[in-house]
Image (cartoon, rainbow, N blue to C red):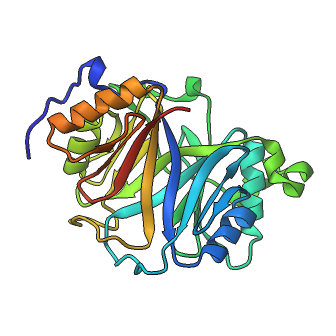
Amino acid sequence: MKSTPELLTPKDLLAADTAMGAVTLDVADLDVMTAYYRDAIALEVISSQGSSVTLGRGTEPVVILRHSPELKAASPGQAGLFHTAILFETQEALAATVATAGQYPGVRFVGSSDHLVSQAFYFDDPEGNGIELYWDRDRTQWSWTHGQVEMSTLYLDPNQFLREHLTEQGLADPTALGGAVVGHVHLSVGDVATAQEFYVHKLGFETTAAMGNQALFVSAGKYHHHMAMNVWNSRGAGPRQRTLGLGQVDIVVPTADEVGALTERMKHFGMQTRDDGQTVSFDDPWANLINVRAAN
């Protein structure tokens, strides 16, 4: 693999106000999955067109469900989505959605953790796609050492969290407590070194935390992480076959000029790109489709 410098120049970095857009999932049962994200995760149907349903809060899309019954389920150990992380504005809003999810028939609750920078609750949807529901502590409470943010995985008692933060208003209507956005996307990959080569040295994120050869966390603008990659279930995985699960990851940059600059940079590295001036798409080393677009 071609070696690239560890330290990128400022013009090579993604803009500080880069954000994540909606995650597209290829699903086998569109009705079941729509009901889950609407009724368990408390998202609203923004649009429904043929074989695709977009859900989010207000006009902000969070997940796009694409009916793909011809696809097979992903095989164990395959690269792809680890989880989509949905960020809430307040602990009250997070508690309301966690409670709603917890009451959903057959819900798969995976666990909860205090990560120092955030509080998080984990679920699997009916087709096995991971979901994180979380709230960020204020950035003034984050600790940085030698350019890396301090994160941990501490026990978070879900019942105590709900006792402290769940309100009658939230239980009655979680969507009334503010918006929700994709805060970060966590991928399963084959190895961390290749992930760093692609997502940091080529795409232009900065490393914010690393766990040896186990996991990598990257962001723009010193967020704790916009994306993460781990090998916990997928060490050694090669490029994906097209299967159910992750269809596309969207990254939103401020301007079309930044899309153009990224397009040229990816071409410089020999990446196959598809672009129309407003968006550019390319595959990461595991054939996860990444789409970068300018903010509307």
Who's the residue at 59% across and 75% down the image?
126
Quarter occupied by residue 15:
top left
Who's the residue at 27% across and 52% down the image?
284
The x and y percentages for residue 55 are 66, 56
The C terminus is located in which quarter? top right
The x and y percentages for residue 289 are 35, 54
Who's the residue at 58% across and 42% down the image?
118
Can residue 201 be seen here?
A: no
Quarter occupied by residue 145:
top left
Q: Is residue 207 above or below residue 274?
A: above
The x and y percentages for residue 271 are 19, 45
Quarter occupied by residue 121:
bottom right
* For residue 47, side relative to residue 148 (left or right): right
* For residue 66, side relative to residue 90 (left or right): left
Which one is in front, 272 or 37? Answer: 272
* For residue 80, side relative to residue 26 (left or right): left
The x and y percentages for residue 294 are 47, 33
Q: Is residue 206 above or below residue 154?
A: above
Q: Is residue 206 above or below residue 215?
A: above
Residue, far top: 10
Who's the residue at 68% across and 79% down the image?
106
Can residue 244 be seen here?
A: yes
Residue, far left: 2
Which one is in front, 104 or 47? Answer: 47
